[in-house]
Amino acid sequence: MNLLTAVRALGPIDLRNLSRDTMQTGMLVVPVILGLALRFGVPPLRNRLLETATFDLEPYYDLLLSCMVLLLPLLFGTVVGFLILDQRDERTLTALQVTPLSLEAYLAYRLATPLAIAIVATLLMVPAAGLLEMSSGAVLLAAIGASPLAPLMALFLAAFSRNKVQGFALQKASGVILFPPVFADFVPPEWQLAFGVFPTFWPFKLFLVLHEGQGNVWWYLLIGLAYQALLALLLMKRFRKMVVC
């Protein structure tokens, strides 16, 4: 059974499950709220800071947008991760092993869906935020570099959580991976690569160099994609073991 068939079989079920879970539905709305908050909230905040503290927030607009580019796929990956945990709690994944839907097709659907949605959301939300002027090609490369974080987050929750309660705890703890790339931007360049152990570092830096027009774009894109692919393979291996058990 191929990916298209998996979409037809599982898509309606996912939509029904999401409509029943207000928290997961709310996560899908967060990117829109975030984009609008950046567009209409940051400029007035900048003016206020200039008046009261003579601090200009504009030089940090790229950092704010970089964080948003990371947060979008992490949100969509979280939603999919909880869908997987729901199905595991209901023993749906165990039942799949005796149906025509293979585990490979199931995983392909589960991982490709948040990745594709993350790319589309990034292409829409970066211009909607209105803080920086970037070409559509640059935004597309940034989206491609960051979107694998979505399946990574889904696999992380599915591979290390035995139930949805553990999933909530891991989801909260995983929020810390947003901070190391930001810290890296304030340390000397020769030390920044030490933060590359965090998968969020590479798409974060990719967005910055795309905005600044530097020539090492492909370095960050390719290494980031390769590293995220390696982590995904390791998480997938652990997830398969948990499903079999």
Image (cartoon, rainbow, N blue to C red):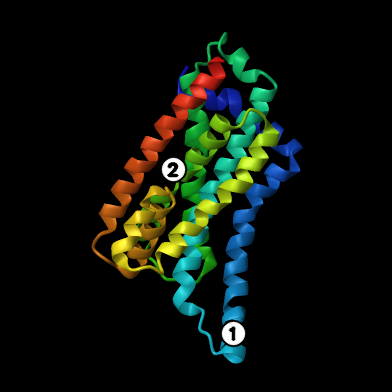
- Residue depicted at x 61% and y 41%: 170
Q: Position of residue 47 (x, y in %)?
A: 58, 85
- Left or right: where 24 falls relative to 73: right
Q: Secondary structure at mark 2?
A: loop
Q: Residues within 10 Å of mark 1 (few under 14, many from 20)?
A: some
Nearest the viewer among 54 and 58 is: 54
The image quadrant where one finds the C terminus is top right
Q: Which mark is residue 49?
A: 1
Would you say residue 136 is visible in this rendering? no
- Left or right: where 159 falls relative to 186: right
Question: In the rendered image of this protein, does residue 181 appear above or below residue 56?
Answer: above
Nearest the viewer among 186 and 92 is: 186
| Badge 1 amino acid | Leu
Residue at far left of view: 215
Picture quadrant of residue 14:
top right
Q: Position of residue 130 (x, y in %)?
A: 51, 70
Q: How many marks?
A: 2
| Badge 2 amino acid | Pro
Q: Position of residue 35 (x, y in %)?
A: 58, 62
Q: Which mark is residue 174?
A: none
- Residue depicted at x 46% and y 67%: 63
- Left or right: where 8 falls relative to 217: right
Residue on which disc 2 sits = 148
Residue at far top of view: 98
- Residue depicted at x 59% and y 84%: 49
Mark 2 or 1: in front is: 1
Question: In the rendered image of this protein, does residue 51 appear above or below residue 176?
Answer: below
